[in-house]
Image (tube, rainbow, N blue to C red):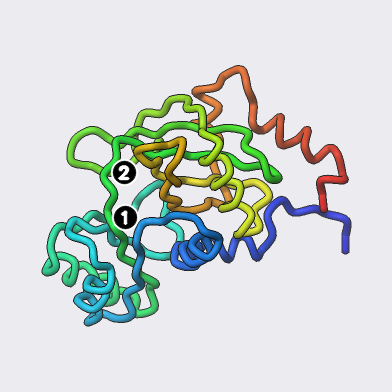
Amino acid sequence: EDGFYVLNSLENWDLCSSKYICDILFRNAGLMTPKTVPVAHSEDTERAYNELGTPFPVILKASTGTQTGVGVVKVDSLSSLHSMIQMMFLYDKLTPIIIQQFIKTDYDVRAVVLNGRIIGSMKRKVIEGADFRSNVSLGADSEAIELTDLEIENCITAAKVVNGMICGVDFIPSKNREKEQPFMLEVNSNPGFGGVEKINPDKSLTEEIFREFLNRDNWK
């Protein structure tokens, strides 16, 4: 009403704030995701793990957004999983918790989508040692990567199903990147550009975003 344009809508923020809802939207759109099951309460561990149907290790995380990978845990046994779930619900009985299939990989990918097109991407290597996360802010190395046509198509679809105008799409690439869909992980409605711009010093994503919205036809 006041003539302001907000890049990402409240709907987009709400959808991206739930990894479980994103998983459902991705699957309904024909995208691949790691197997994902919600945990309803502190004594729901065994039921959830049986429904997941994948061997240990598994990933335990809050369905709401985590910051820089904090709050994402790899769990190696049912007893450990149950103890961690009990502890999480002890501190907040309303915490939305999910468990996911663990997919071993050396790296994942962040693609930045702007208004239905890819404007940048980076390969994020898993942190060396016992860690399994790939967040650049936690010390993971990043480098440039050229996406396949299938990866580009899937990233644009992932951004579209959450109504994202400018967002970061994270995925684990398949073994045959040209022919097999990647595993979509999540869409970030407030992505950082530092990692992508660091490996592409001659290209400013911020400038490209400003140029995009100097044209008010793109405000729709």
Query: In which quarter of the view is residue 4 placed?
Result: bottom right
Residue type, label 2: Arg
Quarter of the N terminus within the rendering? bottom right
Residue, disc 1: 72
Q: Residue furthest front?
A: 179
Checking the image for residue 183, the label placed there is: none
| Residue drawn at 11 percent across, 69 percent down | 79
**Horizontal placement of 54 versus 2: left or right?**
left
Q: Element type at marker 1? A: strand
Residue at the location (16% across, 70% down)? 83
Asked if the residues shown at circle 2 and circle 1 are in contact, with their CB atoms under 8 angstroms apart, the answer is yes
Secondary structure of the residue carrying tag 2 is loop
- Residue at 82% x, 45% y is 218
Q: Give the distance between the C-alpha atoms of the residues marked 2 and 1, in whole angstroms.
A: 8 Å
Query: Which dot marks residue 133?
Result: 2
Q: Position of residue 183 (x, y in %)?
A: 41, 49
Of 38 and 42, nearer the camera is 38
Residue 187 at x, y percent in the picture: 52, 52
Q: Residues within 10 Å of mark 1 (few under 14, many from 20)?
A: some
- Decide which of tag 2 and tag 1 comes sooner along the chain: 1
Residue 161 vertical placement versus 194 (above, below): below
What residue lies at 88% left-to-right and 60% top-to-bottom?
2
Residue 161 vs residue 69, the one in the foreground: 161
Nearer the observer, 163 or 188: 163
User: Does residue 37 appear left or right of residue 56 in this picture?
Assistant: right
